[in-house]
């Protein structure tokens, strides 16, 4: 793998990634390459405690527009 821009065991692949989200992550982190941003996101996801229910947090954080509102009249 001489001459490749990344170290260690890596593979080149094609993925469909939300371009706007990727740009936001790159802006927030200061990374200049998509590879850096994706690797960062993967490493951050891996750091989450395995006993922590990540999907429950995602459901709890849904925008108000997607949740039912009761009629307060």
Image: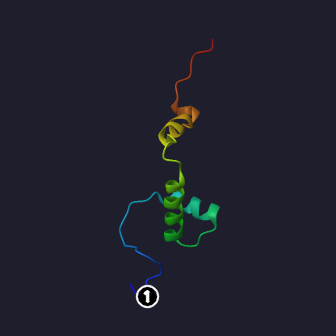
Q: How many marks?
A: 1
Colour mapping? rainbow
Residue that appears at 54% across and 37% down: 62
Can you tell which quarter of the image residue 10 is in? bottom left
Relative to 1, residue 34 above or below: above
Relative to 64, residue 49 above or below: below
**Horizontal placement of 49 versus 10: left or right?**
right
Estimate the x, y position of residue 16 in percent, counting from the top left: 39, 60
Task: Assess disc 1: are there few (<14), some (14-19) or many (≥20) residues with their C-alpha within 10 Å of its C-alpha.
Answer: few
Estimate the x, y position of residue 32 in percent, counting from the top left: 58, 73
Q: Which residue is at the front of the view, 33 or 9?
A: 9
**From this viewpoint, which residue is outermost toward the top?**
73
Q: Quadrant of the N terminus?
A: bottom left
Estimate the x, y position of residue 31 in percent, counting from the top left: 59, 69
Residue that appears at 49% across and 60% down: 42
| Residue beneath disc 1 | 3
Q: Quadrant of the C terminus?
A: top right
Estimate the x, y position of residue 36 in percent, counting from the top left: 53, 70
**From this viewpoint, which residue is outermost toward the bottom?**
3
Q: Which residue is at the front of the view, 19 or 41?
A: 41
- Disc 1 is placed on an element classified as loop
Q: Which residue is at the front of the view, 1 or 68?
A: 1
């Amino acid at each position: 793998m001489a001459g490749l821009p990344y170290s260690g065991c890596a593979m080149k692949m094609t993925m469909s990634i939300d371009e706007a989200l990727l740009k936001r992550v790159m802006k927030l982190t200061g990374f200049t390459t998509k590879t850096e941003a994706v690797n960062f996101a993967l490493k951050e996801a891996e750091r989450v405690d395995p006993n922590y229910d990540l999907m429950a947090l995602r459901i709890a954080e849904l925008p108000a527009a997607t949740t039912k509102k009761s009629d307060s009249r």
